[in-house]
Amino acid sequence: MPPPADIVKVAIEWPGAFPKLMEIDQKKPLSAIIKEVCEGWSLGNHENFALQIADATNFYITEKNRNDIKNGSILRLTTSPYQTAVQLHERIQSSSMDAKLEALKDLASASRDITFAQEFINLDGISLLTQMVESGTDFGDLLSFTLTAFVELMDHGIVSWDTFSVAFIKKIASYVNKSAMDTAVLQRSLAILESMVLNSQDLYHKVAQEITIGQLIPHLQGTDQDIQTYTIAVINALFLKAPEEKRQEMAHILAQKQLRSIILGNVIRSTTPINDEMAHQLYVLQVLTFNLLEDRMMTKMDPQDQAQRDIIFELRRIAFDVECEPNNSGSIEKRKSMYTRDYKKLGFINHVNPAVDFTQIPPGMLALDNMLYFARHHQDAYIRIVLENSSREDKHECPFGRSSIELTKMLCEILKVGELPSENCHDFHPMFFTHDRSFEEFFCISIQLLNKTWKEMRATSEDFNKVMQVVREQIMRALTLKPNSLDQFKSRLQNLSYTEILKIRQSERMNQEDFQSRPILELREKIQPEIMELIKQQRLNRLCEGTCFRKISSRRRQDKFWYCRLSPNHKVLHYGDLEESPQGEVPHDSLQDKLPVADIKAVITGKDCPHMKEKGALKQNKEVLELAFSVLYESDEYLNFIAPDKHEYCVWTDGLNALLGKEMTSDYTKSDMDTLLSMEMKLRLLDLENIQIPEAPPPIPKEPSNYDFVYDCN
């Protein structure tokens, strides 16, 4: 007879004694269970003891998390969180340096547990740590473990960042400003400054007074990628929290300090591969840099502003090499007629007053900025485009003005100018770090592409939107290849001519072709179950290989890992915590926890997951919600997942649904089904190529008058 659901069989350790096997009744109060364990080893004062998970985490068992205890778990009897906090509070104030160092090591480790952290914070432990830092007496490992413990305690979100003094901020900033500083101390100091800036507007102002970009730049010129990552994270935080009126000023300082070229030389083109966190920080910096364009993008042109109108005059002058006529030369009507003719050649929609074209937002004045940059820095190409189109027939000319405005708007959409950076995105483009005016150069390459594509398509004014769609596709396909430089981007576009785009489209259409005739539909229905079974087997095989999942916390770089995989017989899920991301598969025997598939009740996704209902900014992130799923087992217990990416999310939700005998409904399954079904259909229909398949079967002939033609085999 199986044991009751509330009874958990565990082993409990106590130093110097043999482990004790016992059954824990989850309905009994935790204090009663601890008392029973203490009495078994003849220990008094049971209220001074607690149970811990006996693994690398050493997390305390509480009434909130006791349901996480599984059959076969190893627990450890130890001093209570309060007693441990009191002891460590005293030990870290020891006069012996060796004793103090050991105490700080223990504190840094214990602070990862929120139960202990709450008790230590209640003893005013955070203030004690900040006083130790402010005193400046600790250095080396002592200081490193002090800052580590501080970071771990603050990560729990129990204490507000607004409570820290200017003296503490100055001390942390001084560690960053020193040219030679212990790596661990520098890492923690940078992490603290980043958290201060992101979590408090008041602290942003204080940190901004203590830290200058010039003091951060040297940390990017080393070879330690972790230090480089933390440094860019601090720069991003200062950039993100800066008031709008100061962002342009900060961008000017970054340009003066050659930040872009330093990142290009020491990070992007370094021999060390770029890890995910560095890629994320580079993406954030890229987004924040492009967001500086938002102000110009949302500024309408004032047709009465002479300085702005002079820019249009400059475009006309460069294109047609005309001297500015004195005000009294010729009649007003003659000059207006000449201007109208030239503005038409320049491709403006409003030939009389082209300033009106730039009142559309977006792209507003940003389009005019791009046009002037192109005319001044790529003058030959600019003149060639304008003169080429002014000599064509009216219906075949590619309007430079209108094209530039629509292209600028398109590039802003592609680069998502004005949107805040996503929490989990790593999509940075190396080519944008190769030039100080990368957006303008991006425009210059794209406007020449547009003119080339217009000619290849032999387009007329009616085809304008079609040309823009093709150009968008060309740009997006070239960006997907992640070119390392603007020249490489240009060369990728050369290989994506209109003819090539047509071939790619045709190939994709062939692969996705949906035959609608009745015989084909019947064949599809017959093949579909076989393909679905094949996909199911693939999903289960992937689950058997297993996946490493992140335990998302409030600080991304402090993420822990755990691994989950399905047993080869598809009956048990094996899982357990890892210290670091594994290099390959993790064997079953190293994963301590098990969950029988037979116990799984349901698979829950998205905002319905229990770990997505918790409060916190990270939990509300849309992208994290889209990657979250949970497995419900027994009555109300959950195994919670956050997939590393959309692909793994689809694999696991499909695989778990397949194990439960439910339908696999992910986008990935649909895509696989379409691909495999299309391939199988084409193989089976290969012999019928170029043969017309009738919509309906041929009619059955009438029954013959006799069957004399039948040969009797007997």
Image (spheres, rainbow, N blue to C red):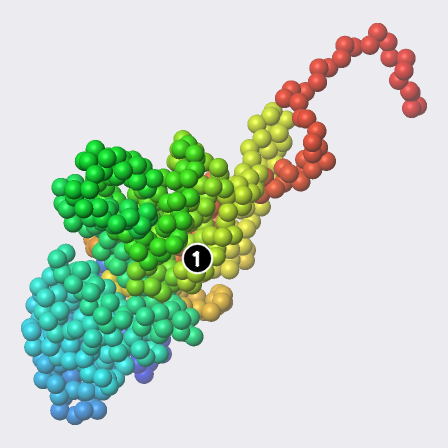
> Quarter of the image holding residue 442?
bottom left
Going by the numbered disc 1, the residue's amino acid type is Phe
Instruction: Determine the residue located farthest toward the right in the rendered image.
Output: 714
Closer to the camera in the image, 684 or 587:
684
In percent of width and height, residue 101 lies at 21, 86
599 up-or-down from 351: above or below: below
> Quarter of the image holding residue 151?
bottom left
515 up-or-down from 478: above or below: above
Residue count near mark 1 (Cα–Cα under 10 Å), binned few <14, some 14–19, many ≥20: some
Closer to the camera in the image, 47 or 528:
528
In percent of width and height, residue 672 lies at 52, 44
Closer to the camera in the image, 286 or 540:
286
Residue 228 at least partly seen: yes
Residue 418 at least partly seen: no
Instruction: Determine the residue located farthest toward the top in the rendered image.
Output: 705
Residue occupying the point 18% across, 35% down: 332
In percent of width and height, residue 220 lies at 29, 75
Q: Quadrant of the C terminus?
A: top right
Compared across the picture, whether 30 is left or right of 603 comes to left
Residue occupying the point 14% across, 56% down: 244
**Element type at marker 1?**
helix
Residue occupying the point 26% across, 39% down: 339
Q: According to the image, label 1 marks what residue? A: 489
In percent of width and height, residue 601 lies at 39, 46
